[in-house]
Amino acid sequence: MRKYYRIYLLYWLITCCFTVNAQTILKYNVNASNGWIPYFISNSPDNPGIIGELVPLILSQANISIENHNFPPKRTNYALENGLLDFDIVSPSWFENQDLGDDFTQSIPILTIQENIITLDKNAHKWQDINQIKDKRIGTIRGYLYHNDTNFIRVDFASERELIKALHRERVGAAISGDLPALYWAKQLNIPITLAAIHSKGELVLRLRKQHAILLPQINAAIIQLQQNGTVNKMINKYTKKKYLINYNELTRV
């Protein structure tokens, strides 16, 4: 009798687990800074960027549905903290002590990411040490997280594109940006810049509200599957090849 009871209990647990997954819908903000190319590309459903394509693939592979929302980037953190959204894509390196907060858990790494101090070529020698940003006015993106923003004076702009323009107009002497977005916009705007000191280096993960932590095994398994079958690398190559970036000029309306 105990044998049959154990089999029944195992069957019930498995069925319950799959039922929860099938019914689960996670709320996600599809909007991002309109300059965070090549990770997110706004108003381009066919080519939404590296993360813009990977997020639906990961959740689909994990058998989880997405409910898309369009909060402005500066409201994303408020929406997450108050349960209006269930997850986003972040790097723990953006947070002080890499602490995502008591209400969140995280997936395994999806891909690596790096932020640099960026500046005009002529000023590069001034920003080779990360400590040189202390108490200085530094260009940042409105709504973005920076692990040490108590050490410098934030000067917020709307996007990475606007950061490059602000450097050119000397509204700030330096800014913080992801390396790939900075190089992309510098090229498109024909404004030579230098990637100076590394501000942060880490991995992008899926930050998930803890009430959905039961879904992490499926999410992590999906990430591993997409990494092992080459999908993640294929997506990175798609959006970082020179030919693709040049052809994308018209869509980004530089």
Image: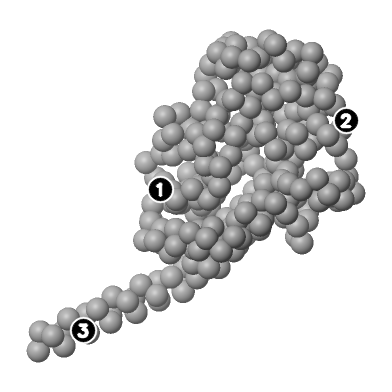
Name which quarter of the figure residue 242 lies in: top right
Which quadrant would the C terminus be assigned to in this image? top right
In the rendered image, which residue does mark 3 sit on? 7
43 displayed left or right of 14: right
Q: Is residue 171 left or right of residue 200?
A: right
Which numbered disc flags the more N-terminal residue, 3 or 1? 3
For residue 13, above or below residue 96: below
- Residue 190, numbered circle: 2
Q: Residues within 10 Å of mark 2 (few under 14, many from 20)?
A: few
Q: Residue 211, located in which quarter of the rendered image?
A: bottom left
- Looking at the picture, which amino acid does disc 1 mark? Thr
Q: Which residue is mark 1?
A: 105
Q: Disc 3 and disc 2: Cα gap in Å?
A: 67 Å
User: Do the numbered discs 3 and 2 sit on residues whose CB atoms are within 8 Å?
Assistant: no
Instruction: Measuring from the top left, give residue 215's x and y in whole percent.
Output: 41, 62
Query: Residue 68 lies in what quarter of the image?
Result: bottom right
Q: What residue is drawn where x is 50% and y is 54%?
A: 86
Q: Are marks 2 and 1 in contact (CB under 8 Å)?
A: no
Amino acid residing under circle 3: Ile
Residue 70 sits above or below residue 154 on the image: below
Q: Residue at x 83, y 49 (%)?
A: 243
**Labels 2 and 1: the sequence-earlier one:** 1
Q: Amino acid at mark 2?
A: Asn
Q: Specify which label sits upstream in the sequence, 3 or 2.
A: 3
